Image (cartoon, rainbow, N blue to C red):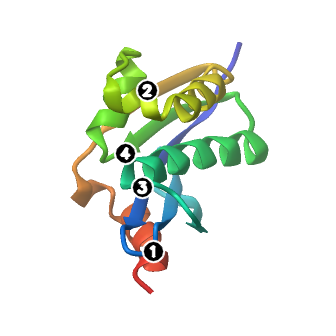
Amino acid sequence: MSFKPALFIYFDGSYNINTKNGSIGFCIKTQGGDILDKENRYIRDIDSNTESEYLALKMSLEYVLKKYNSDNRLFIFGDEKTIINQLKNKQNNEQSLKYDNYISDINNLLRKFNSIVLKNIPQHENKIAHNLSNSLINN
């Protein structure tokens, strides 16, 4: 089986506690660092920043499956350590149980890819996704 070139997904979510709305942002890059796609969306009626982070990851995976397919090796980067660790280790805690539907959906999407790597990165390395997400919530 041959793999297509690697894709790098950077995702982030934002939340406004006053409006109970959020936004997501994600960026898809090549291994060389070229930006292939950027996307952001406003999300109404969510409960937390954690929910927006899960939505950002879920939507980015759906986007990649639709546009590129599952033959690409995926490297997935997010700055929300809890989410990355939960998905990598498949360990449930009280917070993850609250978002079990998102976790299940994301794990189902991840299983469709031949090769994935999940990595937590500092926020300053996730600037594009962070700025995309914040640009909608802060307006």
Q: Is residue 18 above or below residue 39?
A: below
Of the residues under marks 3 and 2, which one precedes in the sequence?
A: 3
**How far apart are labels 4 and 3 at the CA level?**
6 Å
Picture coordinates of residue 87 (x, y %)? 42, 25
Picture coordinates of residue 83 (x, y %)? 37, 35
Q: Residue furthest top?
A: 1
Residue type, mark 2 in image: Leu
The residue pinned by badge 2 equals: 97
Of the residues under marks 4 and 3, which one precedes in the sequence?
A: 3
> Disc 1 vs disc 3: Cβ atoms closer than 8 Å?
no
Q: At x 36% / y 25%, what residue is drawn?
A: 86
Of the residues under marks 4 and 2, which one precedes in the sequence?
A: 4
Q: Is residue 13 above or below residue 59?
A: below
The residue pinned by badge 4 equals: 78
Q: Which mark is residue 19?
A: 1
The kind of secondary structure element at disc 2 is helix
Q: At x 23% / y 60%, what residue is drawn?
A: 124
Neighbourhood count class around disc 4 (C-alpha, 10 Å): few under 14, some 14–19, many 20 upward: many
Of the residues under marks 1 and 3, which one precedes in the sequence?
A: 3
**How far apart are labels 1 and 2 at the CA level?**
24 Å
Residue type, mark 4 in image: Gly
**How far apart are labels 4 and 2 at the CA level?**
20 Å
Residue type, mark 1 in image: Thr
Q: Which mark is residue 12?
A: 3
Task: Indicate the quadrant containing the C terminus: top left, top right, bottom left or bottom right.
Answer: bottom left
- Which of the two discs, 4 and 1, sits closer to the camera? 1
